[in-house]
Amino acid sequence: MAADELAAALLPALLHKLNNVTQVIASVNSLARLTGCAAPLVQCASDLDLAGGELARLGWLVGALARGVGSGIGSPRHEERALEWLLDLLGETLRRDGWELAPGSEIPRVEPEFGFESSWAIASWILACAHSGAQREPLAFALERAGTALVLRTSRAPQQAEGLRTRLEALVPRSHLRYEVRT
C-alpha cells in the first residue's frame, strides 16, 4: 500500500469530521442571524471553542493528506501530536470499513525530530497490516524507541511487506524507523 493510498483511505473520514465542525459553526451562525443579536455567540462560546480546536487539528490533517500525496502546498507544520491525530483518523477510517485496531494500543507522541514522514509511514504500515487480516480481527501495534530509532511492532504483517517496506524506507530510512511483526 503506497502512501497516497493512505490519503485516499483517510479522506472520507476527514470530510465527515470537517462537515461536523462546519455544522456546529453554521448552527451558531443561524441562531445569531435569527435573533439579530450576539447572545447565541455568547451562549455557544464553548461550542465555538471546541470547534476551533477541532478545526486546528483537522487543518493539520488536511495539510498532512496534501503532503502525503506529494503536494508542495504549504510549509511543514511540526506537531508533536501528529501521529496521535493520524492514527485517530485511521482508527475511525478502519472502523467505518469493518477493520479494527486492538484496544489498548498506545499511540505515543513522536518528537518533531522524527518529522511528518515518520508519522505518515507508521500510519501507512498500520493501514496495510489492518487490511491484511480478516475484517473485525483487531490489529495490535506498539511503537517504541530503540536508541535513536523508532520500532513499530504489529500483530500481523501487511501483504507484500517487502515492497511496502521499500516504499516507506524511501520516506524514512531504516536507521530511523523499523518494522517488526510479533504474533
Image (cartoon, rainbow, N blue to C red):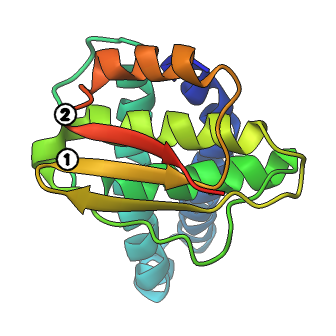
Image spot of residue 16 (x, y percent): 68, 47
Q: How many marks?
A: 2
Instruction: Indicate the quadrant where residue 35 lies.
Output: bottom right
Query: Callout 2: few (<14), some (14-19), or many (20+) C-alpha neighbours within 10 Å?
Result: few
Specify the amino acid type for callout 2: Ser
Image spot of residue 50 (x, y percent): 43, 73
Residue for point 71% across, 26% down: 159
Q: Secondary structure at mark 2?
A: loop
- Check contact, mark 1 vs mark 2: CB within 8 A: yes
Quadrant, the C terminus: bottom right
Specify the amino acid type for callout 1: Ala
In primary-sequence order, the first of circles 1 and 2 is 1
Camera sees residue 127? yes
Left or right: 142 in relation to 8 = left
Check the image and report above or below for 91 versus 42. Answer: above
Residue furthest front as drawn: 183
State the residue in front, 87 or 151: 151
The label on residue 163 is: none
Check the image and report above or below for 77 versus 80. Answer: above
Label 2 sits on residue: 175
Left or right: 147 in relation to 17 = left
Camera sees residue 22? no
State the residue in front, 44 or 125: 125
Image spot of residue 143 (x, y percent): 39, 59
Residue for point 64% across, 39% down: 157
Residue for point 43% across, 56% down: 85
Label 1 sits on residue: 149
Mark 1 vs mark 2, CA separation in Å? 6 Å
Instruction: Indicate the quadrant where residue 111 lies.
Output: bottom left
